[in-house]
Image (tube, rainbow, N blue to C red):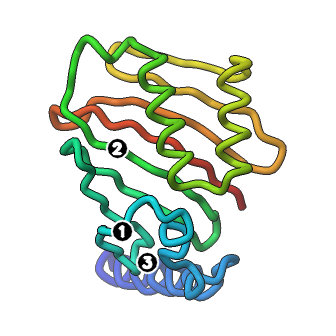
Amino acid sequence: MKKIHLILFMLISNSIICQEIEECVFDRTTQTDEFIIKKGKFTEYKWDNKNKTATIKLENGETLKAFRGGCVHFGMSGEIFTEFDSSKINDLDFWLNKALWISKNLFDNKDYEYLKDKLIKKDYHQERDENSIYIFIPHEIYDEFSISVRMEDGKAVLYVGYYFS
C-alpha cells in the first residue's frame, strides 16, 4: 500500500511540475543575452540559455554571474564571487559601490539610477549577522530589490538584483 501511495504521489507531483513549467507567465524563449550585448561592457562570456545566466570572467580575477529571466517570477541580478577578505565584510560602502558597479553594467539605466538614488539617500533596510549583510531597497513595482553579501565556500559573494511576478 505504501508503494502505491508513493507512486501516486510521484505521478501527481510530476504532473504538477510539468503543468507549472507549461504555464509560465513570462515567455522564456525571449529571454536572451540581449541585455549584456546592449550594455556593451562585456564581450566575452558564456551564456547558459537553459538557466538564463551569463558567466563573465573579470580582468581582476573575479567571476560575475548575470541572470535575466524567469517563469512565474521575472528577475534580473548580478553576483560577483571574489576572494574573501575578512577586513571587507563590514565595509558597507565597499559592497554598495561594487553593487552599483554591477547594476550600472547589467541593469537598465532606470534601475541603476533608482538604486543609486536609494543608496545615496540611505533609503533601505539593513540586516546583518556575523557572516552576511542584507539590504532591502523599497520599490513600488518589484516584489524585492536587494543586495546581499555572504560568505560561501571561502569566497565572498555579492548579489544585487530584483524580481517581480
Q: Residues within 10 Å of mark 1 (few under 14, many from 20)?
A: few
Residue 125 placed where, x, y %?
65, 21
Q: Residues within 10 Å of mark 3 (few under 14, many from 20)?
A: few
**Residue at x 52% of width, y 34% of height:** 147
The image position of residue 76, as x and y in percent, is: 56, 57
Numbered mark located on residue 83 in the image: none
**Residue 24 sits above or below residue 99 on the image:** below
- Position of residue 60 measured from the top left corner of the image (x, y, whole percent): 22, 42
Give the labeled residue for mark 2.
80
72 and 94: which one is in front?
Answer: 94
Image quadrant holding the C terminus, namely bottom right
Frontmost of labels 1 and 3 is: 1
Residue at 67% x, 77% y is 26
Depth check, front residue: 120 or 18: 120
The image quadrant that residue 95 belongs to is: top left
Q: Which residue is mark 1?
A: 43
Three-letter residue code for mark 1: Thr
Residue 9: image tag = 3
Q: Are marks 1 and 3 in contact (CB under 8 Å)?
A: no
Residue drawn where x is 77% and y is 40% of the image: 139
Disc with the residue nearer the chain's start (2 vs 3)? 3
Q: Nearer the viewer, residue 65 or 70?
A: 65
Q: CA distance from mark 1 to mark 2?
A: 17 Å
Find out whether the residues at labels 1 and 2 contact each other: C-beta distance under 8 Å. Answer: no
Residue 112 image point, x, y percent: 65, 44
